[in-house]
Image: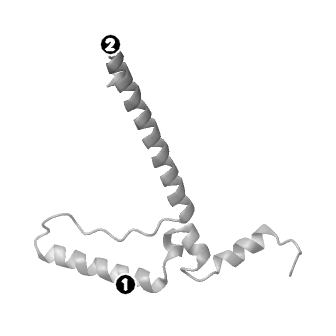
Amino acid sequence: MYARKIRPGLVAALVEHLPAACAVGRELGGANAVTEEFQALAQVDLTIRQLGWSLSGKKGDKPKAWELPVGKREREAREARNTEAKKRYHARVAEREAREQSGERMTLRDL
């Protein structure tokens, strides 16, 4: 086992040259999470869909590019935000129902 400390610049250089779609890339998300072949096929698919849309009289919405995968940490952060928002919502609903049952007048804030 190699126990010597490595400079952060060297680590950054090593990570930069990792292959696409490796475990680190999937963790980070974005373009690093998919292979170059996948990106090329997605671009071909988009071009074909845009061509078909253009030749059909440009009816409907213009085709959009595929979204790149979201990283694991960003996905977990989104889930945490959604969970907190749900908790706040349910607390407001419970408070509103308690006020209605007690007969208090509602204010604009309660709506």
Question: Does residue 42 appear left or right of residue 59 in this picture?
Answer: right
Q: Residue furthest right?
A: 4
Q: Position of residue 43 (x, y in %)?
A: 35, 79
Query: In front: 89, or 52?
Result: 89
Residue nearest the viewer, comparing 104 with 36? 104
Q: What residue is shown at x 43% (from left), y 70% (from top)?
A: 68
Give how far across and how far down residue 10 sits, in percent. Answer: 77, 74
Instruction: Identify which residue, 21 or 43, lies in the foreground.
Output: 21
Q: Residue at x 46, y 69 (%)?
A: 69
Question: Residue 108: x and y, percent?
Answer: 33, 19
In the rendered image, which quarter contains the N terminus?
A: bottom right
**On residue 41, which mark appears?**
1
Residue 13: x %, y % from top left: 71, 75
Answer with the quarter of the image where residue 22 lies.
Answer: bottom right
Q: Amino acid at mark 2?
A: Arg
Q: In the drawing, what numbered circle is on residue 104? A: none
Q: Nearer the viewer, mark 1 or mark 2?
A: 2
Q: Which residue is outermost to the front?
A: 101
Q: Residue furthest left?
A: 57
* Neighbours of disc 2 within 10 Å: few (<14), some (14-19), many (20+): few
Which residue type carries mark 1?
Leu
Height in image: 50 above or below 109? below
The C terminus, quarter of image = top left
Residue position for label 2: 105
Residue 31, relative to residue 82: is it above or below? below
Helix, strand or loop for disc 2: loop
Q: CA distance from mark 1 to mark 2?
A: 60 Å
Specify which label sits upstream in the sequence, 1 or 2. 1
Q: Secondary structure at mark 1?
A: helix
Describe residue 64's horizontal placement relative to residue 82 as left or right: left
Residue at x 41% of width, y 26% of height: 95
Residue 28 image-quadrant placement: bottom right
